[in-house]
Image (cartoon, rainbow, N blue to C red):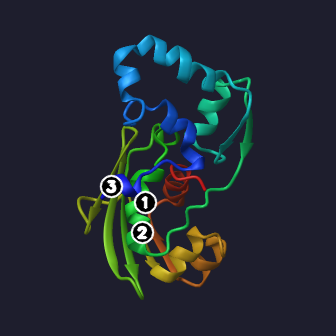
Amino acid sequence: MAKSILKANYKAAYCIAACPAGEDVIGAFLHDRPGFVRDVVKPLQDKVEMLYVVPGSDAETYAAKRFPHKTVKRVSSAIRPQSIAGFLFGLPLLFQRNQSQGLNATYHFTFTGLEPCLATVVIQSKTLQVQQGHVGQADLLVTADSHTWLGLLRQEQPIFWALLRRKIRIKGSLKLLQAFGRCFPA
């Protein structure tokens, strides 16, 4: 099942070509690792090309340091959750460890409206944990209409209007919400 879903596509062709876990290249990698790195990986690393990064992401910082000969182009993330379940599922996938440096906080989310849900998000020591329900003591409590929250993530409206209309309510420091946002740049 997973094999048919995760086939190579043009956006990840370099990654698949250089990945020793790919079934097409595992033999060459296992047989001669230094040769594989020299013949496959190094030419891709040295290639002068455009790298696309999300502003504020760990990739933006890494690319500039590791590949100074490549042009870095900032693009917005095309990932926009369509549901609260999708939002919570996507958090570990989008989490930027280095952007969370120094942040140790527990967030309780209470979603109301079309998709009621309770969730806890813990960011601590550059790690992320997402749990169902409210677990532990929250540093910040966010109560949000699910439709409004998803609209905010899709950048359909500024948070100011949602706060003003009380569609999103926050109990705790607004700075913690801003810090949360930096961990998931879009």
Q: Quadrant of residue 126?
A: top left
Which residue is identified by label 3?
2
Give the amino acid type for the residue marked by disc 1 in the picture. Gly
Q: Residues within 10 Å of mark 2 (few under 14, many from 20)?
A: few
Q: Residues within 10 Å of mark 3 (few under 14, many from 20)?
A: few
What numbered label is drawn on residue 86? 2
Q: Nearer the viewer, residue 51 or 3?
A: 3
Q: Quadrant of residue 34?
A: top left
In the rendered image, the vertical position of residue 16 relative to residue 122, given as above or below? above
**Is 1 placed left or right of 180 in the picture?**
left
Q: Residues within 10 Å of mark 1 (few under 14, many from 20)?
A: some
Q: Nearer the viewer, mark 1 or mark 3?
A: 3
Q: Nearer the viewer, residue 99 or 160?
A: 99
What numbered label is drawn on residue 90? 1
Quarter that holds the C terminus: bottom right
Q: Residue at x 66, y 25 (%)?
A: 67
Give the amino acid type for the residue marked by disc 2 in the picture. Gly
